[in-house]
Image (tube, grey):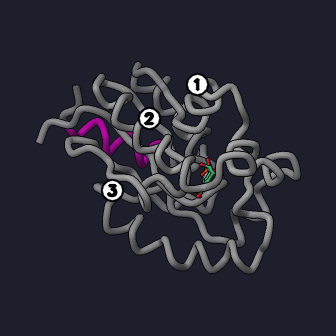
Amino acid sequence: MIYDNIVLIGFMGSGKTSVGKILARQLHKKFVDVDTVIEKEQNSSINDIFDEKGEEYFRSLEQKCIDELTQKTGQVIATGGGLPIYSSIPEKSLIVYIDADFEVILNRLTAKEHAKRPLLQDESRAKALFEQRINTYKELSTFSVDANQTIQTFIHVIVDFVLDQRIL
Ligand code: S3P
């Protein structure tokens, strides 16, 4: 298989954006973040999109965004935590699951990062969402990495895997 792009998936706050930026730099690829693209295109924050237009509308934006982004190749694409649950990720994507435990995620997020995420506000609901989603993340992934340590400790595991693959 020759992959078009590297797509990072995982629960909110697992580190997809930070990992994506480092990975793209190391692999000399362009980094794009689906949430950031949506916020720019809508000229609105994720919180405001959820409040004003609703989650279903946001999910339709995610599908449109990943479809458009993957018209191009050779990118590292960070997705929002719900994207692989509600949207289909185009074939020929090398999908890396950033696999961090729920408690690790909660401890890692700053108050500001926590506040940006509408679906994290109720902790018991967020935990249930986490439990519901992890199997899908695992099933969809080409490769998963244990992300419970700092990024510096696991980034080379992803780089080594990716360098063995054929990516445009
Ligand atoms: C969501 C994750 C968020 C963002 C939105 C919904 C989710 O992205 O897309 O708040 O459903 O898990 P991050 O995974 O970058 O936090």
Q: Position of residue 42 (x, y in %)?
A: 62, 29
Considering depth in this image, is 35 or 57 the residue closer to the camera? 57
**Amino acid type, callout 1:** Glu
Quadrant placement of the N terminus: top left
Residue behind mark 3: 143
Quarter assignment of residue 165: top left
Question: What is the total number of numbered labels drawn onto the structure image?
Answer: 3
Measure how far apart labels 3 and 2 are at the Cα level.
23 Å
The crowd level at tag 3 (other Cα within 10 Å; few <14, some 14-19, many 20+) is some
Measure how far apart labels 3 and 1 are at the Cα level.
30 Å
Residue behind mark 2: 65
Q: Which residues are magenta?
A: 156-165
For discs 3 and 1, the disc positioned in front in the rendered view: 1
Quarter assignment of residue 46: top right
Quadrant placement of the C terminus: top left
Quarter assignment of residue 163: top left
Q: Position of residue 109 (x, y in %)?
A: 78, 54
Is 25 magenta? The answer is: no
For discs 3 and 2, the disc positioned in front in the rendered view: 2
Residue at horizontal 39 percent and vertical 59 percent from the top: 144
Q: Which mark is residue 41?
A: 1
Considering depth in this image, is 108 or 123 the residue closer to the camera? 123
Comes first in the chain, label 1 or label 2: 1
**Amino acid type, callout 3:** Phe
